[in-house]
Amino acid sequence: MVVAADPPHKHDENRLSANVRLRMLDNALNEEDGIYSSDVELKRGGKSFTVDTLAHFKGQYRGAELFFIVGGDMLENFPEWREPKRILSMAKLVAVSRPDKLRDMNALARSIEERFGGTVIVSEFNGPDISSTEVRRRMFEAEPVDDLVLLETEHFMYRSALYMPDEIVSIRSRLASVIRKKRLNHTMLTACEAVKLAHLYGVDTKKARLAAILHDCIKLPNKELLEYCEQHCYDISDEERKNPYLIHARLGAVIAMDEYGVKDPEVLQAIQNHTLGRVGMSMLDKIIYVADKIEPTRDFEGVDEMRKAAYDDIDLCMLMVMRHSAEYTQASGRAVNPATQSVMDYLKKEMEKNNGQ
């Protein structure tokens, strides 16, 4: 599979760099046997002409029969390619067509053969209907893409904020300067999880993405958090002073509003409640709370069961997460935060009420 450095018929100033596309292809082929990525056109540089690439492989695999596989839509402008006759002298051209386009593609294939010689094979497409245009659209609009790309590719796109609006790319860039890389990756993968949960539960996915990306915008070591609050005259409670890690959620909502310009009260509330939760949480609150705990890099005992529960019953998942957190807190010799206990009691009552119905 060859990554084009600069396709002559598809010039696009907004196209991702060839090296990024190569990394995405490598991710996609990571578990595939017998399919390999090639950077031959990247190394050659300049415009990527198929005739030069085929000549390269023809020389590399002397005596082999080559098949050049393309999307059926490429047949329409094939006569305009550089040296189409030479292309067909080196390889059989395989055009993969959608079933509804088969008749048109067969006629086009025959006309190309008559004009340039060689062999053009039309292969009827019967796999999933996957479009790169649709992948880019969904990433931009904060819609799930897990049914269109492999998990590794989905995570790579989120970690790098690929195909996202400029506002989101800018926020990620700013975060990269204030939080560690590991925390940044966690943040972007939390957004990935939040978008899928929001889509499932009928919540605004763009709000979920924004809240998730900013949920840890001031997640600093405890000492630095306390110093930040002192320098900016930010009042903290006795409980927060004893457990400084609690500060970042409440302070994060302030930072999101003051420094990142977020005005939506639902987004700010979700950021504020993602650590301790609260009684009467909105569905967006629950999604950010849960996504933070089950995103793909989390590997604590029981997380797989929590991930399954999140997509079946988000209240059950929240209760599982809180119980796990409470057990960890108690094992560390600390008392469970009263707010956490209140939320756990509330969730149990809600689940009992719902089950009773």
Image (cartoon, rainbow, N blue to C red):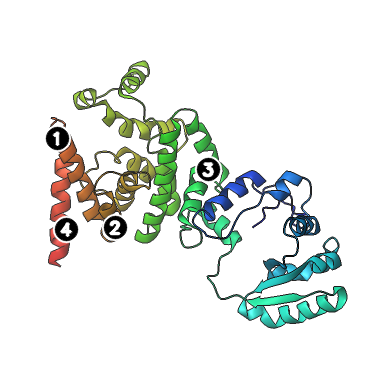
Q: Give the mark nearer the N terminus: 1 vs 4.
A: 1
**Residue identified by numbered label 2:** 308
Label 2 residue SS: helix
Q: Which mark is nearer the camera, 1 or 4?
A: 1
Out of 189 and 276, give the one closest to the viewer.
189
Report the amino acid beneath label 4.
Met
Taking 10 as reference, is 299 left or right? left
Q: Which residue is mark 3?
A: 160
In the image, 83 versus 54, the foreground residue is: 54
Percent x, y of residue 227: 34, 17
Count of marks overlaid on the render: 4
Q: Amino acid at mark 3?
A: Ser
Determine which quarter of the picture holds residue 113: bottom right
Please name the residue shown 30% across and 23% down the image.
Answer: 222
- Disc 4 secondary structure class: helix
Above or below, 104 relative to 3:
below
Q: Which residue is mark 4?
A: 351
Q: Is residue 15 visible?
A: yes
Q: CA distance from mark 1 to mark 2?
A: 26 Å
Q: Kindly check if marks 3 and 4 are in contact, taking CB atoms under 8 A apart as contact.
A: no
Secondary structure of the residue carrying tag 1 is: helix
Numbered label attached to residue 9:
none
Q: Position of residue 59 (x, y in %)?
A: 77, 56
Q: Check disc 1 and give the amino acid type.
A: Ala
| Of marks 1 and 3, the one in the foreground | 1
